[in-house]
Image (spheres, grey):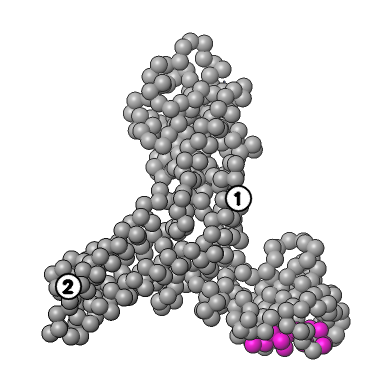
Amino acid sequence: MTIYALSTGPGISGVAIIRISGEETSEIIKCLTNKKIPKPRMATLRKINNINTSELIDEGIIIWFPGPESYTGEDMAEIHIHGSKAVILAVQSEISKIKNCRLAEPGEFTKLAFQNGKINLLKAESIADLISSETEIQRLQAVKIMKGKSSAKFNQLREKLLKILSFVEAQIDFPEEDLPDENLNKIKKDSSEVINEIKKILDDQKVGEIIREGFKIAIVGPTNAGKSSLINNLSNREVAIVSEIAGTTRDVIETHLNIDGYPVVISDTAGIRDSKDEIEKKGIKLSLKKAENADLKLVVVDAKSIDLSGFLNDLLKNNAILVVNKSDLLDEELDPKVSKFEHVQISIKDNLNIDKLISKIKINLKKKFITEEDILITRERHRQHLIHCVDHLKNFSDKNSKKDFDKAAEDLRLATRHLGMIVGKVDVEEILGSIFNDFCIGK
Ligand SMILES: Nc1nc2c(ncn2[C@@H]2O[C@H](COP(=O)(O)OP(=O)(O)O)[C@@H](O)[C@H]2O)c(=O)[nH]1
Ligand SMILES: [Mg+2]
């Protein structure tokens, strides 16, 4: 089967690129140009014609990448044409007339690259991350993983486990020959080293995931405190409805910001109060959940009616800034209880101290993004495999010290399998779908 897709973004552009991969690639190029195939990897100007009528569709550049030296490992070509909807449609419709050709599915080019051994899973994922990176730090992280240090580390740990496995298997195969103490000690030492290394990687404050998904800020607090006004102010646009009617915001409203190059997802939530309204109640539940999962909470209160008991006290316990809003209305001293918490007194109406709040946010944000580590976990998938790996290794150690080598070996195999699944060194058909579906078509 030969696949094709528009690889550049949709919409009007100067140039658009249609990518083709598969056995029919050279046939397609010959049919479209009525000429022989260009020299490999040489940009060549060609007229692109309607296959049946030879009528000119557009003029463009063809690049021919014969397999296996191509991105997917198969025969591939790129057709660079003018980026109008009509030209793109006309060329695609000509290609579709050739037998065994179909539109590619999302991520299919990269999936082929993986299946043909051109890249490993971590690299495939980092390509997806690079394509969707919005801020500099996200781009840097994707490139770091693309360079392969993480893959090398996981492979090295896996090799170490395979080595231990060979010792244990020798013991199973030749039970009468007692393993020399030296070997037993090495098994113990090496497996605990792997456990410690993985634990260290896991103990990362989730930096990699925060960079990929964005630092999560939840704006929470009682109704009418100015939460929706704050999200609008911070994002410089009207994302949420502001009104003096309490209970206006019911759903969670999210917006993406780039603060000093750091990706931030900020969400406005329903004001928390005792409500009889079913929909509002659901909204309040969502607010509390957002607060729980956030990297930072902005707890907004009205300067004139601060009650920090109850749920506010809980919200303020950790990763929170108390934002005392509407200070323009305040004519008396601020409630002294406020000073117990990290707080800032603002007025959104008068644009007062918003810069102070932003610097406080930045300090919190930057703390979260500090990492010395080269090995970053960027997805929950990696984390889960590492956790399972450690669990199996612990079971292995137990059984191994009881000299129950058969069962110990099985745990070791499972641990190895989990490490292998991160880079894709095992039969991973079941996880492929979920990874490549995240891509867009043409990648
Ligand atoms: N005086 C004053 N009013 C404000 C300030 N910020 C917001 N408001 C008003 O307070 C009301 C509730 O604001 P809103 O953002 O909808 O609060 P939410 O319920 O917490 O989302 C609206 O009428 C806003 O115009 C402020 O700094 N000073
Ligand atoms: Mg609101």
Kindly identify which numbered label has been placed on residue 135. Answer: 1
- Reply above or below: 339 against 175: above
Tag 1's secondary structure? loop
Q: Is residue 25 left or right of residue 144?
A: right
Query: What's the residue at 42%, 40% (across, down)?
Result: 291
Say what amino acid the circle numbered 2 marks.
Asp
Q: Position of residue 100 (x, y in %)?
A: 64, 87
Q: Residue furthest right?
A: 55
Q: Position of residue 311 (x, y in %)?
A: 35, 31
- Reply above or below: 289 against 329: below
Query: Which residue is more in the foreground, 167 or 280?
Result: 167
Q: Residues within 10 Å of mark 1 (few under 14, many from 20)?
A: some
Tag 2's secondary structure? helix
Q: Is residue 314 left or right of residue 436?
A: left
Give the mark nearer the N terminus: 1 vs 2: 1
Q: Label 2 belongs to which residue?
A: 181
Q: Quadrant of residue 402?
A: bottom left
Q: Which residues are magenta?
A: 23-35
Q: Is residue 128 left or right of residue 410?
A: right
Query: What's the residue at 59%, 29% (across, down)?
Result: 355
